[in-house]
Amino acid sequence: MNLSILTTGGTIDKTYNEFDGSLSNSRSILETILGSLRLPDLFIRHQAVMSKDSLEMTVEDREVILQAVRTALPTSDAVVIVHGTDTLSVTGDFLEEHLQDLDRPVVMTGAMRPYEFRDTDALQNVTEALLAARLLPAGVYVAMHNRVLQFPGVYKDRRALTFRPGSEQG
């Protein structure tokens, strides 16, 4: 399987600066995660699209992500996007709206806690996204916390710290 993984930053990539106590997006941790997994017959092309907290993303950033997906699709069986969870739903809806003739899966994932934290969900979520990319039909999805949800109509449940189908208002 040929897979493109696009990284955009977000909590999953946040690293701790022990000098000032801050968390920031400075580099992608994807290679570290992938290096810990057994991935036979999976050929990965990783593209670091940006390194931003998703709360700082603009419409222009989402257009850059859309273009990166469009560029990756012709040479990939699927695309995985590692994205911050705060606005993952906004980007997912944006991609679903603009990728009308999609003929393969685009799977988004991220983490509620940085990969560097002991109680991270990053490894689980990336692993689930990789499997989902192999199994799902065409569409835009989020794979996290033992669930796969299809866009549109996915929201971040901030109390439960996961994603749910529907809208935030109910």
Image (tube, rainbow, N blue to C red):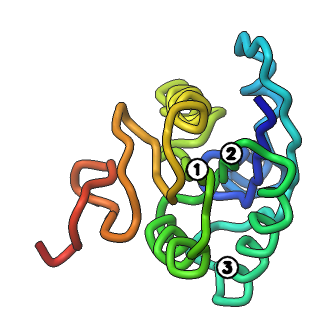
| Image point (62%, 57%), residue name | 103
Q: Secondary structure at mark 1?
A: strand
Of residues 79 and 111, the one drawn nearer to the viewer in this rendering: 79
Image position of 29 with respect to 85: above or below: above
Q: What label does residue 40 carry, if any?
A: none
Q: What label does residue 105 carry, if any?
A: 1
Q: What label does residue 78 carry, if any?
A: 2
Of residues 74 and 72, the one drawn nearer to the viewer in this rendering: 74
Give the left or right position of residue 93, taking residue 48 as reference.
Answer: left
Give the x, y percent position of residue 110.
55, 48
Q: Quadrant of the C terminus?
A: bottom left
The residue carrying pointer 1 sits among few (fewer than 14), some (14 to 19) or many (20 or more) residues within 10 Å by Cα, namely: many
Distance of mark 2 from mark 3, alpha carbons?
19 Å
Q: Secondary structure at mark 2?
A: strand
Residue at the left extreme, as displayed: 170
Image position of 15 with respect to 140: above or below: above
Q: Which residue is mark 3?
A: 62
**Residue type beneath disc 1:** Pro
The numbered mark, 2 or 1, whose residue comes first in the sequence reads 2
**Residue type beneath disc 3:** Arg
Give the left or right position of residue 37, taking residue 137 as reference.
Answer: right
Give the left or right position of residue 143, taking residue 23 as reference.
Answer: left
Image position of 19 with respect to 94: above or below: above
The numbered mark, 2 or 3, whose residue comes first in the sequence reads 3
